[in-house]
Image (tube, rainbow, N blue to C red):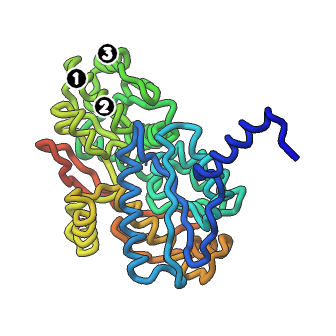
């Protein structure tokens, strides 16, 4: 029997698809598969690259020590290119095609929020290293994180503005297309107003915007003592430059989304004397942090690990610890073990998973000083 001619190209195309890796990978029962989705390229590549490197280092160490439950960990990493709309598809692929027992990801809250319903519906545990928006773990009982959440970060920043910056009149510039920015802005507002502060200008932008002159002109007219920008480094660096060009000299400050080398390389002088909160500082003199920094530098040609690298590292270790305690690769059992994580000492501090599947950890505030990130203070949870 021969196939109708018209079908031949279709069959060829299907064959090519199969060969190109869309086929299920053969299951090797000697390994344990963990899926990772990250922004390895695109607008927030610094986030994905860092968390991925931290995760890789953790998995390399776990495997060198014999793996988990007698199996080597196989990390399947997928790039969502920092784009909206990719993470749910990737999560589906990792779960259905690759049969991962758990997912690690993402840094950005909006992208974690896209994948979380997929993981929840499939009952596959997902651990976000760094997403701080509360809604991420509210998606359901299979969704965890190993970092603090934005009600804490927003409160810490509001208090910092008044105590350290002595700013009572603040302007806010929020990205309306980022769940992270909207949430952090809201929690900041609540605490800052409660403490008697005044928001003299409340301006908005969207992810990937490049021209902030209209918003900054309105902000300049309101004469704030500081400008709060709860955004990601790509836009923050441009906002800082355009603010300085308009003659705004007051400090800018923001949250963990500022953290990337690009803040300094693109922001340059414009970000000098600006402040942001984050999860960890490589200068922390504890043995755990210093050993991690040394190992990371050795593996990644001298690069100093930032907060995402540290959280990526801790997220993999917390997950491996849960799998070990579960004594099984059954995702439901891994979920239960994650939920009872208590006193896990990592490089970002101690992880205790609470009833809402969040971790409560200190924040650190850093200042851009002489083109570097300098430690200012630590804020207890
Ligand atoms: N907390 C940010 C978010 O939820 C992501 C982030 C974490 C960015 C840590 C930098 C460092 O979107």
Vertical arrangement, residue 20 with respect to residue 344, above or below: above
Position of residue 343 in the picture relative to residue 302 (left or right): right
| Residue 339 showing in the rendered view | yes
Residue 217's disc number: 3
- Say which element carries label 2: strand
Which residue is farthest left?
A: 370
Reading the chain from its start, which is encountered first: label 3 or label 1? 3
Q: Position of residue 180 (x, y in %)?
A: 48, 42
Which residue is farthest right?
A: 1
Reading the chain from its start, which is encountered first: label 2 or label 1? 2
Vertical arrangement, residue 283 with respect to residue 372, above or below: below
| Residue 155 showing in the rendered view | no
Q: Position of residue 18 (x, y in %)?
A: 65, 51
- How many numbered badges does the structure rendering display? 3
Residue denoted by label 2: 227
- Does the CB distance between marks 2 and 1 fall below 8 Å? yes
Residue denoted by label 1: 248
Residue depicted at 47% across the width and 54% down the height = 149
Vertical arrangement, residue 213 with respect to residue 379, above or below: above
Residue 223, quarter of the rendered image = top left
Residue 305's disc number: none
- Say which element carries label 3: helix
Q: CA distance from mark 2 to mark 1?
A: 10 Å
Mark 3, residues whose alpha carbon is within 10 Å: few (<14), some, or many (≥20)?
some
Q: CA distance from mark 3 to mark 1?
A: 9 Å
For the residue pair 33 and 196, the one nearer the viewer reads as 33
Position of residue 6 in the picture relative to residue 230 (left or right): right
């Amino acid at each position: 029997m021969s196939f109708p001619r018209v079908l031949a190209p279709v069959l060829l195309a299907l064959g090519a698809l199969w060969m190109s890796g869309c086929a299920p990978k053969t299951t090797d029962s000697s390994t344990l598969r963990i899926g990772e989705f990250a922004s390895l390229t695109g607008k927030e590549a610094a986030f994905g690259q860092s968390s991925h490197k931290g995760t890789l280092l953790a998995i390399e160490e776990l495997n060198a020590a014999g793996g988990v439950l007698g199996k080597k960990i196989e990390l399947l990493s997928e790039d969502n290119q920092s784009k909206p709309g990719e993470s749910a598809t990737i999560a589906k692929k990792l779960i259905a095609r690759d049969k991962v027992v758990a997912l690690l990801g993402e840094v950005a809250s909006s992208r974690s929020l896209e994948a979380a319903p997929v993981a929840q519906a499939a009952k596959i545990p997902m651990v976000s290293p760094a997403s701080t928006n509360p809604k991420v773990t509210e998606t359901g009982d299979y969704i965890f994180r190993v970092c603090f959440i934005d009600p804490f970060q927003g409160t810490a920043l509001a208090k910092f503005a008044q105590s350290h910056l002595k700013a009572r009149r603040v302007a806010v510039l929020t990205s309306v297309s980022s769940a992270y920015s909207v949430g952090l802005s809201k929690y900041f507002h609540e605490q800052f107003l409660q403490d008697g502060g005044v928001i003299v200008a409340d301006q908005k932008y969207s992810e990937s915007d490049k021209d902030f002159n209209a918003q900054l002109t309105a902000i300049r007219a309101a004469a704030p003592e500081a400008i709060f920008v709860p955004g990601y480094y790509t836009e923050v660096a441009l906002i800082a430059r355009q603010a300085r060009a308009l003659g705004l000299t007051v400090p800018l400050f923001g949250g963990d989304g500022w953290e990337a080398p690009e803040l300094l390389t693109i922001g340059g002088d414009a970000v000098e004397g600006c402040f942001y909160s984050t999860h960890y500082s490589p200068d922390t003199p504890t043995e755990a942090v210093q050993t991690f920094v040394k190992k990371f530098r050795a593996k990644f040609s001298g690069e100093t690990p930032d907060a995402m690298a540290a959280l990526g590292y801790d997220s993999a270790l917390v997950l491996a610890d849960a799998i070990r305690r579960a004594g099984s690769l059954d995702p439901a059992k891994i979920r239960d073990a994650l939920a009872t994580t208590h006193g896990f000492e990592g490089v970002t501090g101690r992880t205790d998973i609470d009833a809402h599947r969040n971790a409560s950890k200190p924040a650190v505030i850093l200042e851009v000083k002489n083109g570097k990130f300098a430690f200012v203070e630590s804020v207890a949870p």
